Image (spheres, rainbow, N blue to C red):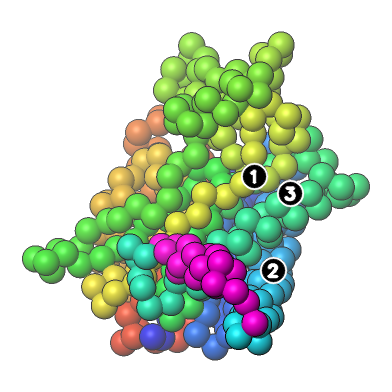
Amino acid sequence: MVTNIVLLYYHVPFLTIYGCCFQNFGSRTDTVFCGVFDGHGPYGHMVAKKVRDHLPLKLSAHWEVNISSEDVLREISLNTAGSVNSEETALISADKDSRASVDLDVTEKNPDIFKTLKESFLKAFKVMDRELRLHTNIDCFCSGTTAVTLVKQGPYLVVGNVGDSRAVLATRDKDNSLKAVQLTVDLKPNLPAEAERIRNCKGCVFALHDEPTVARVWLPNNDAPGLAMARAFGDFFLKDFGLISVPEISCRCLSEEDEFIVLATDGIWDVLSNKEVIDIIEYAPACSSAARTLVQTAVRAWRYKYLTTKVDDCAVVCLFLDSNLSNLSYASNT
């Protein structure tokens, strides 16, 4: 399956958003990595850039280590199969069945890739956040970034997300109509599970009177600052009060009906629905201008919907899955 990627940045008034795409990710010819990172706070642009530059490398490295470890364990299992007793054999079989059941509803053909990539995402995100905490040149105390990322290997797709950016898949239904499938959850503090975790850690969740629809995470004895997401890299002033950088991970086996995936910051989704977004991409003049068209439409929607509010930062990555499309192409305006 040939992949065509269109990438666009839009910044108002400062560039705090970053995106990246890597074909042949991890030196694998059929593998693509994409990510969008939306910084916030005084040094959010530096945090987003740092994560953009280093998270893919960490993910690739952990993926390679996990694959190597599984190969070693598999070889040990084969070499010792004849010497174990029946009880040990049963335990090995149970463990094998447990590993094989990961994402069995998605695909029974190659579940190991999902298990391995899930573990790699979790480790890479953990190490990335730890590195930010120790970084002396970037003040991450009150600054951070979201991250919506994906790895596609052949038909297999794994998405890792922290924050309120979003991934949406455009696919054809039985009537050949294009429909939107949301691949991520907007990890905001008003989600019951997120709010429960934050409150269990003595953090507070509430919305201000002048923005009643925007729940934020707050320190227990301080009104400011409040963060409008429940997971993020950085923002270490809230990490002891329920904010985490553990990604939500989802897996999917892509089909011929799937046409493209959109990764975008909340500046897009705050003014356009999932269906509106995929329709804009579908009817764009060309793949190379699809992301630009989407951002321009979102900016107009912002100015119409929020007359007195500045346009939020927007970033879009479109990953086209149609094998008839051309090779890698980019579009940008900054």
Q: CA distance from mark 3 to mark 2?
A: 15 Å
Q: Main secondary structure of the magenta part?
A: helix
Which residues are drawn in magenta? 83-103
Residue type at the position of mark 2: His
The correct choice, above or below, for 329 with respect to 35 in the image is below
Q: Which mark is residue 62?
A: 2
Q: Nearer the viewer, residue 13 or 233?
A: 233
Give the residue at x 25% y 65%: 171
Mark 1 lies on residue: 245
The three-letter code of the residue at mark 1 reads Ser
Q: Is residue 70 left or right of residue 104?
A: right
Report how far apart the C-alphas of labels 1 and 2 lie in the structure.
Answer: 17 Å
- Res 31 visible: yes
Label 3 is placed on what type of residue? Answer: Asp
- Asked whether 36 or 112 is in front, the reply is 112
**Of the residues under marks 1 and 3, which one precedes in the sequence?**
3
* Circles 1, 3 touching at the beta carbon (< 8 Å): yes
